[in-house]
Image: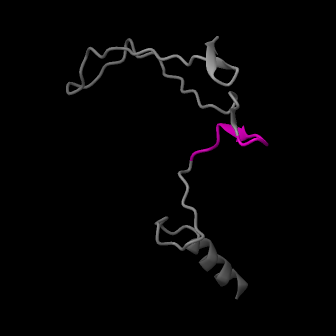
């Protein structure tokens, strides 16, 4: 008796997430937090929670004929800054 109810309830929680699930249902995006909220309402980024993706070396990798052989490499970097007097920012 209880096993059947438990299976039904477990299957009910894995239904499709739509906006029509009720007014108290929060769908979410499945992404985790990258920081925390402070007492004063600010958001502090915790850099150990920020995702970093390691791309393998693709120099000797053979691509298929429908993929462009010459792809330009873009380099991005995060610049950190500190707030001075709540109006100006100083780059580190």
Q: Say above or below: 6 vs 37.
A: below
The x, y position of residue 68, in whole percent, is: 24, 21
Secondary structure mostly seen in magenta is loop
The reply, left or right, for residue 33 in relation to residue 76 is right
Viewer-side residue, 55 vs 60: 55
The x, y position of residue 42, in whole percent, is: 70, 38
Q: Quadrant of residue 53?
A: top right
The x, y position of residue 26, in whole percent, is: 58, 62
Kindly identify the residue that appears in the image at 60 percent across and 79 percent down: 8
Quarter of the C terminus within the rendering: top right
Viewer-side residue, 15 vs 85: 85
Q: Quadrant of residue 83?
A: top right
Viewer-side residue, 59 vs 32: 32
9 within the magenta span: no
Kindly identify the residue that appears in the image at 55 percent across and 72 percent down: 23
The magenta span reads 31-41
The x, y position of residue 73, in whole percent, is: 37, 14
Kindly identify the residue that appears in the image at 62 percent across and 18 percent down: 88
The reply, left or right, for residue 38 in relation to residue 20 is right
């Amino acid at each position: 008796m209880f096993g059947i109810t438990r299976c039904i309830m477990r299957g009910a929680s894995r239904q499709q997430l739509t906006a029509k699930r009720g007014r108290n249902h929060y769908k979410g995006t499945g992404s985790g937090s990258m920081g925390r909220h402070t007492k004063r309402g600010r958001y502090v980024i915790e850099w150990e929670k920020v995702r970093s993706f390691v791309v393998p070396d693709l120099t000797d990798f053979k691509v298929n004929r429908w993929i462009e052989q010459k792809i330009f490499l873009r380099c991005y970097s995060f610049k950190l800054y500190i707030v001075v007097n709540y109006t100006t920012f100083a780059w580190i």
